[in-house]
Amino acid sequence: MYDVIISGGGPVGLGLAIELGQRGARVAVIERNETPPRIPKGQNLTQRTMEHMAAWGVEDDIRAAKTIPKGVGLGGLTAYGTLTSGYHYDWFKRASVAPFYSAENERLPQYATEAVLRARVAQLASVDAFYGWTTVDHSQDDSGVTLQMTRGAETRALRGQYAVACEGSRSRLRDAAGITETRQDHEKLMALIVFRSPALFDLVQARFPDKQFYNVIHPDLDGYWQFFGMVDWGQTFFFHAPVPDDTDRTRFDFTGYIQSVIGEPLTLETEYVGFWDLRITLADSYRAGRVFIAGDAAHSHPPYGGYGINTGFEDARNLGWKLSARLAGYGGPGLLDSYEAERRPVFASTATQFIEQFIKDDRAFINAHDPARDTADFEAAWARRATGAAGSGIGGFRPHYSGSPLVIGAAETAPSAVGQHVMQAAPGHHLPPQVLPSGRAVPGTLSATGFTLLALSGADPGFAEAAKALDVPLTVCAEDAPEVARIYGAPLILLRPDGFVAWTAEHCDAPDRVLLQATGG
């Protein structure tokens, strides 16, 4: 009998397995691929995701596995017309929000990330991985979930208290559990092409030496992107872009298409061609009884802005500590429902206020400004766009859980992806890093198993005693740190296991009430 069975051992499923396994849960992972597919996607790992990697004990291994040499810039650019048109500006400057996180961002193909996570899973005695197996059916009752899985002619059944579908956008377990989706179809066929071109590498190194991904907006594409990214240093790139609906692998000139977007007839060799439909989907529920969904099984979208894999990892971190708390007995009856209450509105906000907004903004720009029609007008508008682009999609992207039933005293009324990065400790928000007078780093003081109380006046107002009475795992970090308290805006800060702030205050007369609400009681 497992505590949790995870159907789908891609990056999100593996991350969830690690989150649970490190907390002692008995976990099974079912993954149909014997080895990670070598398709370059999910490459941009944000600072927040690298905080997860640190918590999972793999940050150094992730950085060692990347295919881009250490020290090479990881930035991106937006160009107009073609990559080499001369009209371009910096895009998605993640460095602009670096002070608000305790880890630097990274870039490597998803299969390299998966390999590191698989190695970490293998180190956890409480986690069993079934690679090469596929989930084909499920049943659930009041005491647990049974998953049927197959490998060739073999069939096995696994039993667990809970199951989580992390199988991607075509999740069989999600559909079998009766969880429906709402789709917004953009009616665009997209191609993903992996190609080898040392000539393109030489070009981008000469012109854009600190950039690793390149977004081209074209006046004929109604705001939809043509997008390049470097995969293997010196030679390999991926490219995705809209193609005609009747495109297939044999009758379309992919080489000519890529050359036209570059703007030069550079030599290239196509290694892989795949297709996908440009749509945004959001599950109508994140839970059906004892079955949960996470990652692309819960939400999917075009790879605009690198939100996909990073959003999935945040799902894993959020759901993982809550399942662990419920299994350990200190999670209250409302804790597991808070997963959907927190994570679903964050993705809905991400989809509408960032991903779709990118398309709308680009569409409005190309419709209003044309260098062939009025060069001076276009260049002035492009300059304004470039000036405002430094933090576009990054500075305003700060997912939070204000309004969650687990958060006490939040200013906002509902979870959202929109927020401004500030150092203040705000209930429902991620806590930025600071260094305490002792030299200890926050959030390096986070408990490995439960909650953390920062008592920056040096005294605990009774949380340790209340936590013991409630069987809530709590680490108290009591240190006289008036300057840090001033920066954070409060001397008392309760941190959840995922690094988000549950509560802040000047003083507290009822720590038991705070802990009960923060744990879903």
Image (spheres, rainbow, N blue to C red):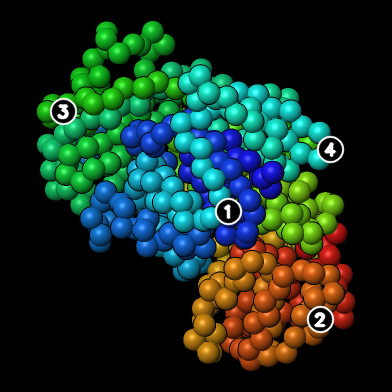
Q: Quadrant of the N terminus?
A: top right
Who is closer to the viewer here, 275 or 127? 127
Q: Quadrant of the C terminus?
A: bottom right
User: Residue 242: which disc?
Assistant: none
Which is closer to the viewer, label 1 or label 2?
1
State the image coordinates of residue 39 (x, y, percent, origin top left). 35, 33
Name the residue rendered at 61%, 47% in the picture. Answer: 27
Examine the image and state in which quarter residue 409 appears: bottom right
Does label 1 or label 4 sit earlier along the sequence?
1
Does label 3 or label 4 sit earlier along the sequence?
4
Do the numbered discs 1 and 2 sit on residues whose CB atoms are within 8 Å?
A: no
Q: Read off the residue under disc 1.
A: 126
Q: What is the spatial separation of the Cα atoms under label 2 and label 4, in whole angstroms?
A: 34 Å
Do the numbered discs 3 and 2 sit on residues whose CB atoms are within 8 Å?
A: no
Q: Read off the residue under disc 2.
A: 465
Does label 3 or label 1 sit earlier along the sequence?
1
Specify whether 234 is left or right of 254.
left
Q: Read off the residue under disc 4.
A: 142
State the image coordinates of residue 403 (x, y, percent, origin top left). 77, 54
Does label 3 or label 2 sit earlier along the sequence?
3
Mark 2 neighbour density, 10 Å: few (under 14) some (14–19) many (20 or more): some
Mark 4 neighbour density, 10 Å: few (under 14) some (14–19) many (20 or more): few
Does label 2 or label 4 sit earlier along the sequence?
4
Q: What is the spatial separation of the Cα atoms under label 3 and label 2, in whole angstroms?
A: 66 Å
Mark 3 neighbour density, 10 Å: few (under 14) some (14–19) many (20 or more): some
Q: Element at badge 3?
A: loop
Does label 1 or label 2 sit earlier along the sequence?
1
Who is closer to the viewer here, 196 or 213? 196
User: Residue 268: which disc?
Assistant: 3
- Tell me the kind of residue under disc 1: Ser
Which is closer to the viewer, label 1 or label 4?
1
